[in-house]
Amino acid sequence: MRVDKFFDIIGADFYSGVPDSQLKSLCNFLIDKYGIDSKHHIIAANEGNCTAIAAGYHLATGKVPVVYMQNSGEGNIINPGASLLNDKVYAIPVIFVIGWRGEPGVHDEPQHIYQGEVTIKLLDDMGISSFVIGPETTDDEVANAMCDFKELLSAGKDVAFVIRKGALTDAPKVEYKNDNIMKREDIIKHIVAVSGDDPIISTTGKASRELFEIREANEQSHQYDFLTVGSMGHSSSIALGVAINKPEKKIWCIDGDGALLMHMGAMPVIGANNPENLVHIVINNGAHETVGGMPTVASSIDLIAIAKACGYKYAVSVDDFDALDREINMAKERNELSFIEIKSSIGAREDLGRPTTSALENKENFMRYLSS
C-alpha cells in the first residue's frame, strides 16, 4: 500500500523510532514531511528510548504516538513495554510499526532468522495485538484493523502493525549526505593495513561486510575478525570481553555512530575497566546508513568529550587520511585505552557483497585464532 495512505489511516502526529530498511518508505516519508522535528519526529538511540519518548508524549498530550523499528529491536522494548506501557501498570497506548526481517519462508541474513521466527510470538507474549501488512494487503483491510485497534488503544493497550518486505510503497526520494571526504571502506582498508594480525571486532551492517570483502581482496584469512552481524550496539562490549581476557593482544573494535549511540552505556564500563590493549574506533557518518541513511545525532555531539568523560585515556577525532594513518599507527604502539572517531562520508559500493561464511564458522575460526 502507499505509505501516505498508511500514514493517513494511522492518523497520529508524533513518531519516534530507529530506522529499518524494511520501513525505508515510512522513514523517507517522515523525513520528507517532518524532517527531524521534536514536535513530530524523533530518531532515538534505541527502541526502548523511543518507546519512553512516546510514553512522555502521551503523558503530555493524551494522544497516541507511533514507535517504528526493525523486529530486532523488540528485545529493547520488552522492559518498557511490560513495566511502563502495559495496561496493568500505566496503561499507555502506543502504536508500534515493526519491520519483519527474517520472516519465515523469506530468505534473509542469519542474524534475522530466529528473530523473524519469534516476532509475532513476542508481541503476543507482551499482550500487544498485531496485524501483518504485506504487499497484497488492501487499504480497507488496514483501515479495518486500525478501527479495531482504536478500541484497544482507548483501553490503554498497545498494538502493532508488522510490515512485510515490500508492503509500503511510493515513498518520496530523499538524499542523505554529509560533507566528509573519507569513505568507510577506504577507512577500514587503512585500519586493516595497520592492525596486521591483531584481532578485530566489527559492528553490524556494512562495516562488517566491507571488512569481509577487504580480507577477500587481500587474500587474507578471516580468522582475525569477529563480524558482529547482528546485536547492534554491542560490538564494543564484545571487544572489552576479548581484550580483558587476551591482554597480550592488541584488540581493535570498528564501531559505527548509530551502534555507539544505541548502547552508549558500554563506554563508561569500558573506561572503568581500562583495557590498555583496546582501540575503540567509531566511524561516524552521522547516519543509519545500512538501513537507508536516516540521520543519527552523532554529527552534533562531541564524542571525544564523552569518551574522555567515560575514562578513555586517549581520545581523538580525525577527518582526513593523513591524520587517520598517524593516529592508528600510534594506537598500534600505545599501551593505553584509545578512542578514535573517524569522520566518514555516507555511501557504499552498489555491488557490496555479504560474508560467504556462516556466523558459526566465523565464531569458530576467530576463537581458534585467539587461542593459537
Image (cartoon, helix red, strand yellow):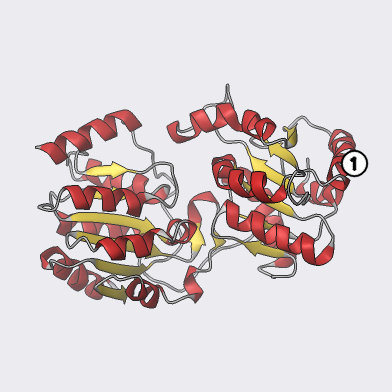
Asked if residue 142 lies left or right of residue 296, the reply is right
Question: Would residue 307 be visible to someone looking at this image?
Answer: yes
Please give the name of the residue rendered at 50% of the width and 62% of the height, measured from the top-left corner: 287
- Give residue 146's position: percent from left, percent from top: 86, 41
Q: Quadrant of the N terminus?
A: top right
Question: For residue 164, which quarter of the picture?
Answer: top right
Question: For residue 321, which quarter of the picture?
Answer: bottom left
Q: In this view, does 125 lie above or below 30?
A: above
| Residue type at the position of mark 1 | Glu
- Give residue 319's position: percent from left, percent from top: 33, 74
Residue where numbered disc 1 is placed: 151
- Give residue 221's position: percent from left, percent from top: 17, 39
Q: Which of 345 and 48 is in front in this view?
A: 48
Q: In which quarter of the image is the C terminus?
A: top left
Q: Is residue 35 above or below residue 252?
A: below
Asked if residue 77 lies left or right of residue 186, the reply is right
- Give residue 327's position: percent from left, percent from top: 21, 71
Question: Would residue 18 be visible to someone looking at this image?
Answer: no
* SS of the residue under disc 1: helix
